[in-house]
Image (cartoon, rainbow, N blue to C red):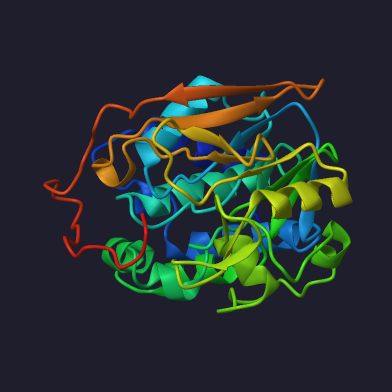
Amino acid sequence: MAGYSPSDLDKIILDMFTLKRGGSAAAEILPEAEVCKLCDMAKEILQREDNVKAVKTPVIVVGDVHGQFFDLLELFEIGGKPPFHNYLFLGDYVDRGYYSLDCVLLLVALKVRYPDRIALTRGNHECRQITQVYGFYDECLRVHGTTNVWKHFTDLFDYLPLAAIVDDAIFCPHGGLSPSLDTVAQMQQLERFQEIPHEGPICDLMWSDPDDRVGWGISPRGAGYTFGQDVSEHFNHTNGFEFIVRAHQLVMEGYNWSHENAVVTLFSAPNYCYRCGNQAAIMEVDEHMHTKFIQFDPAPRRGGPNSKEVTVSRQAPDYFL
């Protein structure tokens, strides 16, 4: 199957940026057979990337997006659109929000079109099991009438890098650290092309959280661990990092420093789940490694639970927001 030309990709991306309607534009812009083609092109790019991807400055780092497509468009208005600005996304592109398909389609198209400008890493929601519970599977079935598109994207998720490093100075996982991994060199040896396991180092990178207690603890999420300031500082010192930036947790101001500035949590979905009332943030890192956090509020509401295009489950989630 022939791939897309740059002009084809430009049209897909332009359509996604301009078709700001009340419902999903994903099926209209890219039918099922075309999604397969796009995912195959993305796999070819991602399989050549390391488990821990090296990213150069200047770059804008983005936390959880969670299917909030119009907030993703707002984010690009604030930070600037590719290819004029470089981006590192830390996972959780799908689930929870109403427009996971639109989010992941735009981000994957941007990755294929500008592979050196867009870095995508894996979050705990980029897997088959979680997406069958928290919305992406149901959205794919509703929009396309089959589960094939969900299968194409979840197969692609197995290829995403596990974390990134910005200029050898900032470590960027989705969740956190692992008691099984002391160095980035150990992470580079992992076999990542698989579903996220229920336990082990890959699971820990996706699921772990910083904590006020010292050492390692049992995570209340049921996966991964909690890790204390002593763990963060030891990891940063061992690997020569200035600090860790990670996503994975809702923080009301969009970002939150912890462990005496050894860790910062970044969350980029404003008014998460359309009810949490939080701000979102992105983090700019310039060529001199100076960082700046830009906070933003939700984009004007379009669609939603009462839209004809959207059906939303009212069942309460069974793990932490």
Residue 5 appearing in the image: no
Q: Residue at x 39, y 53 (%)?
A: 100
Q: Which residue is drawn at 19% across and 65% down?
A: 315
Q: Please provide percent x and percent y for residue 134.
A: 34, 64
Q: In which quarter of the image is residue 312?
A: bottom left
Q: Say left or right for 4 vs 270.
A: right
Q: Say left or right for 32 vs 10.
A: left
**140 lies above or below 25:** below
The quadrant of the image that shows the N terminus is: bottom right
Residue placed most toward the observer, 277 or 305 = 277
Q: In which quarter of the image is residue 313?
A: bottom left
Q: Residue at x 60, y 29 (%)?
A: 283
**265 lies above or below 210:** above
Count of number-bearing discs: 0
Q: Please provide percent x and percent y for residue 246.
A: 60, 46
Residue placed most toward the observer, 149 or 242 = 242
Residue 302 appearing in the image: yes
User: Which residue extends farthest front?
Assistant: 214
**84 lies above or below 245:** above
Q: Please provide percent x and percent y for residue 48.
A: 81, 60
Q: Say left or right for 220 vs 229.
A: left
The quadrant of the image that shows the C terminus is: bottom left
Q: Please provide percent x and percent y for residue 218.
A: 53, 70
Q: Residue at x 71, y 68 (%)?
A: 179
Residue placed most toward the observer, 269 or 198 = 198
Q: Say left or right for 293 vs 300.
A: right
